[in-house]
Amino acid sequence: MTATTEPDRAQVPLTGLLIGEEERAAVERVLRSGMLAQGPEVAAFEEEFSAHVAGRACVAVNSGTSALLLSLLALGIGPGDEVIVPSFSFAATANAVFLAGAEPVFADIEPEHFCLDPDAVLAAITPRTAAVVPVHLYGHPAAMGRLEGIARGHGLAVVEDAAQAHLATRGGRPVGTFGAAAAFSFYPTKNMTCGEGGMVVCADDATARTVRLLRNQGMERRYANELRGYNMRMTDLHAAIGRVQLRRLPTWTRVRRANAQFLGAALASLDAAGVLSTPRSAPAAAPAWHQYTVRVPRRDEVAADLADLGVAASVFYPVPIHRLPAYDLDLDLPRTEAAAREVLSLPVHPALSDADLGRITTGLTAAVTR
């Protein structure tokens, strides 16, 4: 368990937004400065985030979706290209491909880690395939070693969707450092937040410069527009919040990992009995534990029982992207379909107390054995 002890609350929340006086003071500092957009706070945030991704060039933008889109565009992905993505993810993963003018091609996932299956990626490659977007879902790193090898062998770009995986590593290597580019999100429910925002992590300075142009109407100097770009800048207000949150992120990540370890141990007997499956970590993987996601029969009934017991749980994602009305494709992705039927995410965030963790495990035990 964590070292935190608090009285029981009315409900154990699924996410815990930790905003304190330091974040408020940072916002006040920016307001007093009079420089609110694309100023020194953004530059400092980019530099500080770079230290967590092996010194790679970082470009702050206004959302994680923008980070994905600009990553693809900066790498030349566009009309006529296919990009392999998982269907078991949030719609933004595929939407960014579509908005870049390319076609998302959906591949199945590994059953244990919910990330792209390298064999499914290999089977999905065609002469039009230009890139692959592995998602580090729930904060677990995708199988980047094999995916990198497949990409090299077929001349494909790799863009990591690291929206949920801040500080996760695989083989000691931080996510965000495997692909030609990577996209992080700072939405309020993520492991750290700016209020809203994203970060593009780039393997080389040329890609970073193109992303900087694209986020700022295509210009590096005012009225010298080199590209047809967007307004996807991050404000200094958001960056100031992000800088504070980033300083706290290593501690929060350690607590998430401790909470996940506690949940795994407390639920081990249920796993052994076959009434649910707890999440597994791949060898040499250190997940960020954005979500602690179990598989459970009667998933919707169990979630309702947990809610009655005051424990918030949720399903990410009940409908695979390829079945959403926006795409509506008839595909054979059996492991994706199974996950969508069975997954249930439990609270694992660093605001949980010891009492909260106890309520989660006792509540889930009662729900699945009812």
Image (cartoon, helix red, strand yellow):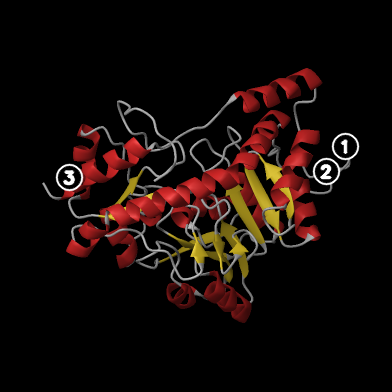
Which type of secondary structure does the marked residue at label 3 adopt?
helix
Task: Please determine whether, in this image, residue 86 is positioned above or below residue 34.
Answer: below
Residue under the image location 67 percent in, 53 percent down: 52
**First in residue order: circle 3 vs circle 1:** 1
The amino acid type, in three-letter code, at marker 1 is Arg
Residue under the image location 20 percent in, 33 percent down: 308
Q: Residues within 10 Å of mark 1 (few under 14, many from 20)?
A: few
Task: Please determine whether, in this image, residue 211 is positioned above or below residue 175.
Answer: above
Instruction: Identify the mark at residue 219; answer none if there is no mark.
Output: 2
Residue 90, visible in the rendered structure: no
Residue under the image location 33 percent in, 56 percent down: 264
Point out residue 60 in the picture as x, y percentages from the top left corner: 70, 43
Point out residue 68 in the picture as x, y percentages from the top left corner: 60, 52
Q: CA distance from mark 2 to mark 1?
A: 6 Å
Find out whether the residues at labels 2 and 1 contact each other: C-beta distance under 8 Å: yes
Q: Residue furthest left?
A: 370
Q: Which residue is mark 3?
A: 367
Which type of secondary structure does the marked residue at label 1 adopt?
loop
In-front residue for pair 116/226: 116
Which type of secondary structure does the marked residue at label 2 adopt?
loop
Q: Is residue 207 left or right of residue 324?
A: right
